[in-house]
Amino acid sequence: MGTFIQLVIDGLSTGSIYAALALAIVLVNQATGLINFAQGGMAVLSAYIAWVLNGFGIPLLLAILAAVVISFFLGAVIERFLIRRFEGGDPDTAVVATIGLLTLITGLCAWIWTYNNRLFPSLFPLETVQIAGAVISVRSLGTIVVIVAIMLLLQALFLGTKLGLALRAVAINPASAAFSGVNVGRNLMVGWGLAAVLGAVAGVLVAPQLTLTPGMMDSALVYALAACILGGLSSPIGVVVAAWLIGVLENLAAVYVPFIGHDLKIAVPFILIFVVLIVRPQGLFGRKAVVRV
Amino acid sequence: MAANTDLSTRTRVLGRPWVPWAAAGLVIVLMIVLPLILPEFANQTIARIGVFAVAVLGLNVVMGYTGQVSLGQIFFVGVGAYVTAFGVNADWNIVLIFVLACLVPAVIGLLIALAAARLGGLAIAMVTIALPIVGVPLAKRLSDFTGGSQGTSARFSSAPEWTGLYDDQWQLYIVFLIGGITFLLTRNLVRGKYGRAFAIVKNNEAVAGSMGISPYRYKVLAFTIASLIGGVSGFLYMVVIQYTSPETLNFGHSIELLAAMVIGGAGSIIGSLLGGVWYVIVPYVTGIIDPNITALLQGAILLIVLFILPGGLVSLPRLWRRRGRDAGRGGGVLGDDGQPDAAASVTGTPTVGDALGAPSAGGPSKPSPPPPTTQS
């Protein structure tokens, strides 16, 4: 029973990382209708920035906050000068543009910091606490708390502020939003900036565990995409729940299903997806898209 | 007047029914002669281009023509390669091996498509991304079949004694033969009834449905054909490279393949060929420039090409012609194909006089109507 609880909490913790990245993908997708494959790469770059700042002697928390702010502007700049060229065009070209961006950012990180693993200090102490007979690391609990707090903040931003209203308006109908005096371009930049911030948080939270390498977020990106399909691209809450589900299930399957083990646990979310797709093609929480001719 | 005659002669010659046959004949002659005269390295490079051009062609069927983003194409190439390696090492008949190398990926593709095609738009991309990601650990796990992490090699494409050819020449001939047939069959497929159905599904699924074309069925069909062509590519991969490992179906290769397809030109047969060239040549070139920044350069080149040519390399001649025409109208400079000149002389305006009279302006005084494609 102790092992089981421990696995569930650890699963929720890794699931939270996927959730942050998945939310970033949903945010971009809702605003611009494209899937940003570079989201993981941008997160890695943010983590490297935090690492460098920390290396200059800036306290870790401040370094992370600074990296988050830098990431916001980086995301906005990428939208303005790179992605805007492809918005409204052929979606395949836009997807490939984000793939090019992923290659570029990964290459940039590899060029500056090489492919060697860098140790990233943890924001949380490496202690463990005993809960109901299970040994649970403070890091897992901390990760979950941080991600939940950020999600609540984001929800408050979207539902309770004028900026959130404008962002939603741009996402739903850019043309009407523009007619109502909303600056669509600036809001798209803000959307990308916020997505980059979410990615940055995911990056600095996962870096201590995986150690910092240019390809660190590659598998996290895949899990995040899986969460997006499973939860439905139109539902932020669904995506988060799906990400947690994936985190927990893959942890449990790795331990309790001998054939899967740790090497094949990445297959778990996709088996889950196949089952869900046959029953609910729009995802667990998604709305069925109605297309007008 | 001379230009006018020239133009009409040209259209008359190009319109003749024997011209495509002559072009095809020329290509076939080149395909027979080139392997004999080129150095070994060139032959190997061309063979590799052939292998990946076929893989890109398969991706084009599902993505370029049917509009379903697939990130799993390399998985089917890998399955084809593994089946070939296994068959060769088990001493099966080579024809049987080839058939299996096509059929096994096709069946896997069919099963996956039956579930994945229920999703619309980019969601298919996110399902198919799983194939290479799950494929790598799976290939490591099934070590009896795949040789585990070390991979497996199969030497079966050495040139037979009676031909007197070198191995690289023999391999290139195999690639030309199988790849050529695959390209020809695919070209016929996408230009016929199925190609039109794919195009409607790509443009508007609702319209397709209202015309009695089931989007679901055609998506599954396109995906299955793409997997089958991926299997052909996998077979050729083993012919040329003779070794495969889990690294073959690495996720990175899958997105490079996708990039190669868009760069070459989505929904184009020639574009698939250019995509294969891109896939093989660009890593080679960036490796020469500076091996440390290969990934950086590849990403940058990819983005630059997308910025300049969103339609892929295949749209380059069109862009070129338009440039030439604009220049011809603006400054009286001839386009590379001489068409601005021809268009001007048809309406009786001497191009040289136009250039002297209004060197800078785009010619509001010029009576000739602009060529139709200039403004598009």
Image (cartoon, coloured by chain):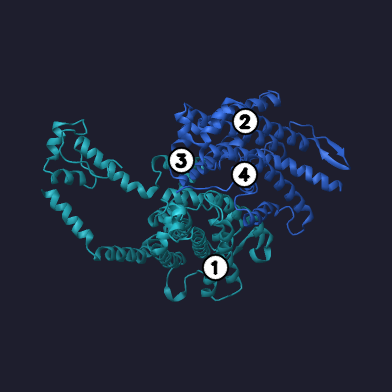
Foreground of the two, A172 or B175: A172
Q: CA distance from mark 3 to mark 1?
A: 35 Å
Q: Which of pointers 4 and 2 lies earlier in the amino acid sequence?
A: 2
- What chain is the cyan one? B
B292 w.r.t. B10: above or below: above
| Label tally | 4
Say what secondary structure mark 1 lies in: helix
Q: What shade has chain A been given? A: blue
Q: Report the disc number at residue A49.
A: none
Amino acid on which disc 1 is placed: Ala
Foreground of the two, A220 or B246: A220
Foreground of the two, A223 or A261: A223
Say what secondary structure mark 2 lies in: helix
> Where in the figure is residue B202, as x and y percent of width and height?
45, 53
Amino acid on which disc 2 is placed: Leu
Q: Chain of mark 3?
A: B
